[in-house]
């Protein structure tokens, strides 16, 4: 005897009673419904895999670009324990820029500034640092200022996620 009673929820997960769903799996209606459910689950899984692949491709940095970034970090004398940490942190910025040395240099400068902003505990200091950056980039007002603020906040969240050990002393609000 099966462990599922006729009036119990069907173990297939349809939400229907077992007797109205899979008790007699040989009926064409039930087989069709089960196949459609299986196909929908497979299609959703494939779609998620494609999204992950697209995301990984969009934010991936080639080994050659990483080498150039390390050289730039060294040339700019950015004080950081491990240059790879900064490279991982700025990956989204690198992926959105042209891979010219000049652009990558600007991205490293911007990324190191975001790194410093991310380490600021005081919201006032963070806000003032962001104002300084906005003035330097001539983005202090309007939509550009709001966009810069959004990017800075996202980079701050990214830093806290990637390097949580550096933020353990902070109180959670």
Image: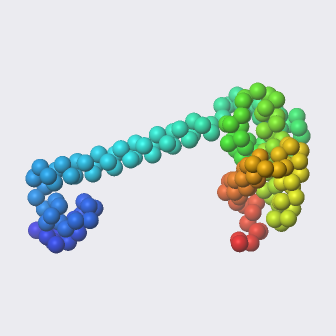
Q: Nearer the viewer, residue 108 or 151?
A: 151
Q: Which residue lies at the image location 16% right of the left edge and 72% below the top edge?
A: 7
The image position of residue 87, as x and y in percent, is 73, 41
Residue 129 image-quadrant placement: bottom right
Q: Which residue lies at the image location 74% right of the left edge and 72% below the top edge?
A: 171
Relative to 158, residue 101 above or below: above
* Left or right of 46, for residue 84: right
Q: Which residue lies at the image location 87% right of the left edge and 62% below the top edge?
A: 125
Residue 128 image-quadrant placement: bottom right
Asked if residue 44 shows in the view, the reply is: yes
Quadrant assignment for the N terminus: bottom left
Relative to 167, residue 115 above or below: above
Asked if residue 85 shows in the view, the reply is: no
Q: Nearer the viewer, residue 130 or 34?
A: 130
The image position of residue 172, as x and y in percent, is 71, 71
* Left or right of 137, for residue 98: left
In the rendered image, the residue lying farthest to the front is 142
Relative to 145, residue 120 above or below: below
The image position of residue 157, as x and y in percent, is 69, 57
Quadrant assignment for the C terminus: bottom right
The image position of residue 137, as x and y in percent, is 85, 43
Total marks drawn? 0
Q: Which residue lies at the image location 75% right of the left edge and 63% below the top edge?
A: 167
Relative to 55, residue 14 above or below: below
Colouring chosen for the image of the structure: rainbow
* Left or right of 57, for residue 117: right
Q: Nearer the viewer, residue 105 or 128?
A: 128
């Amino acid at each position: 005897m099966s462990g599922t009673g006729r009036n119990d929820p069907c173990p297939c997960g349809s939400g229907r009673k077992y007797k109205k769903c899979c008790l007699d799996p040989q009926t064409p209606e039930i087989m069709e419904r089960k196949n459609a459910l299986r196909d929908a689950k497979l299609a959703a899984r494939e779609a998620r895999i494609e999204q992950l692949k697209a995301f990984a491709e969009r934010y991936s940095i080639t080994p050659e670009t990483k080498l150039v970034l390390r050289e730039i970090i060294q040339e700019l004398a950015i004080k950081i324990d491990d240059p790879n940490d900064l490279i991982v942190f700025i990956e989204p910025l690198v992926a959105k820029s042209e891979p010219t040395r000049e652009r990558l240099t600007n991205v490293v400068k911007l990324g190191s500034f975001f790194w410093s902003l991310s380490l600021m505990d005081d919201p006032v200091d963070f806000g003032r640092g962001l104002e300084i950056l906005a003035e330097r980039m001539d983005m202090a007002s309007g939509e550009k200022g709001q966009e810069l603020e959004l990017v800075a906040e996202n980079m701050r969240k990214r830093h806290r996620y990637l390097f949580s050990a550096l933020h353990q002393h902070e109180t959670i609000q």
